[in-house]
Amino acid sequence: MGERGEIRYYDYISDKVALVQDLYDFDKWKSGGNYYNRQKKLLSDNCLKNNK
């Protein structure tokens, strides 16, 4: 995942990636919602936003 929230590369290889854990999503961490896989795709809405 790019620092700018771009997920083009992830979209390109997502069928090869089994699991992604978002280490910076502290709100969803306690409920186990910070894991993404082939059924629960990582989207740009789930990305850390950079305020530059």
Image (tube, helix red, strand yellow):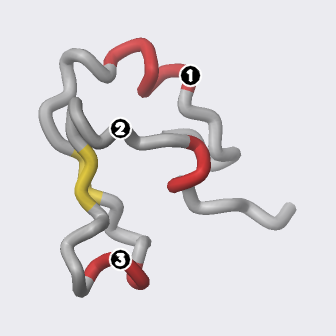
Earlier along the polypeptide chain: callout 3 or callout 2?
3
Outermost residue toward the left in this view: 18
- Does 21 sit above or below residue 44? below
Q: Residue at x 34, y 60 (%)?
A: 22
- Type of amino acid at the residue the image marks with label 1: Arg
Looking at the rendered structure, the number of numbered marks drawn on it comes to 3
Which residue type carries mark 3?
Answer: Lys
Answer above or below: position of 28 versus 38: below
Task: Find residue 10 and report its horizontal and vertical position in percent.
Answer: 42, 27
Residue 25 falls in which quadrant of the image?
bottom left
Q: Position of residue 14 (x, y in %)?
A: 31, 22
**Circle 1 is placed at which residue position?**
8
CA–CA distance in space, label 3 to label 1: 23 Å
Residue picked out by circle 2: 41
Q: Which residue is mark 3?
A: 28
Percent position (x, y) of residue 51? 81, 66
Three-letter amino acid code at the position of disc 2? Lys
Q: Which mark is residue 46?
A: none
Mark 2 surroundings: few (<14), some (14-19) or many (≥20) residues within 10 A: some
CA gap, disc 1 and disc 2: 13 Å
Q: Badge 1: few (under 14), some or many (20 or more) residues near its Cα, within 10 Å?
A: few
Numbered disc 1: secondary structure: helix
Q: Position of residue 16 (x, y in %)?
A: 19, 18
> Which of the two discs, 3 and 1, labels the residue nearer the N terminus?
1
Instruction: Indicate left or right for 11 with 29 as reference.
Output: right
| Mark 3 neighbour density, 10 Å: few (under 14) some (14–19) many (20 or more) | few
CA gap between label 3 and label 2 equals 15 Å
> Do the residues bearing badges 3 and 2 touch, measured as CB atoms within 8 Å?
no
Q: Residue at x 24, y 16 (%)?
A: 15
> Which of the two labelled residues, at mark 1 and mark 2, occupies the earlier sequence position?
1
